[in-house]
Image (cartoon, rainbow, N blue to C red):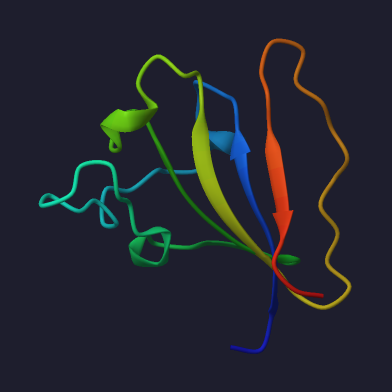
Amino acid sequence: MNTLQLFVFLLCLIFKVDGDEVHSAGKDEAHPNLFHLSGVTSNRYDAGTVQGSNEEVWPILKDQFGSVYLITLKPYGVRQPHWHTVAWEMNYVISG
């Protein structure tokens, strides 16, 4: 992979980010609390890719007002600073 994996974070939104589709490809039927973000179709942007899930396809997120996303930024890619007035968010830098 030629990009840096920088952020895995919880977006506390009950709607789809920027209108992106959320796919169930990462769903693990044998383990309902496990979801494979790497199995989800990537939404591609100039700065990198976004893969994610929400409560529609991953039941453990139900009633948590949350979504889970894996963001892979290309070198020099920037994640826009933002805030959520009624939600929480966690960010993890994996490398870079």
| Image quadrant occupied by the N terminus | bottom right
Report the quarter where the C terminus lies. Answer: bottom right
Residue sitting nearer the eye, 21 or 60? 60
Residue 47: x, y in percent?
Answer: 75, 66
Q: Residue at x 59, y 26 (%)?
A: 12
Q: Which residue appears farthest toward the bottom when viewing the image?
A: 2
Name the quadrant containing residue 36. bottom left
Residue 57, given in percent of the width and then of the height, sits at 28, 37
Q: Pick the residue in front: 94 or 19.
A: 94
Is residue 38 found left or right of 25 in the rendered image?
right
Q: Name the residue rendered at 84%, 32% in the picture.
A: 82
Number of disc labels: 0
- The structure residue drawn at horizontal position 30% and vertical position 37%, both measured from the top left corner, is 58
Which residue sits furthest top?
A: 86
Single out the residue that lies furthest toward the left: 30
Residue 27: where, in percent of width, then height? 24, 51
Question: Which residue is at a point 33% across and 65% down the rendered structure image?
Answer: 39
**For residue 38, side relative to residue 33 (left or right):** right
- In the depicted structure, whether residue 2 falls above or below residue 48: below
Which of 63/82 is in front? Answer: 63
Instruction: Name above or below for residue 34 compared with residue 84.
Output: below
Q: In this picture, is 58 found above or below 24?
A: above
Q: Residue 43's x, y, as percent? A: 52, 58
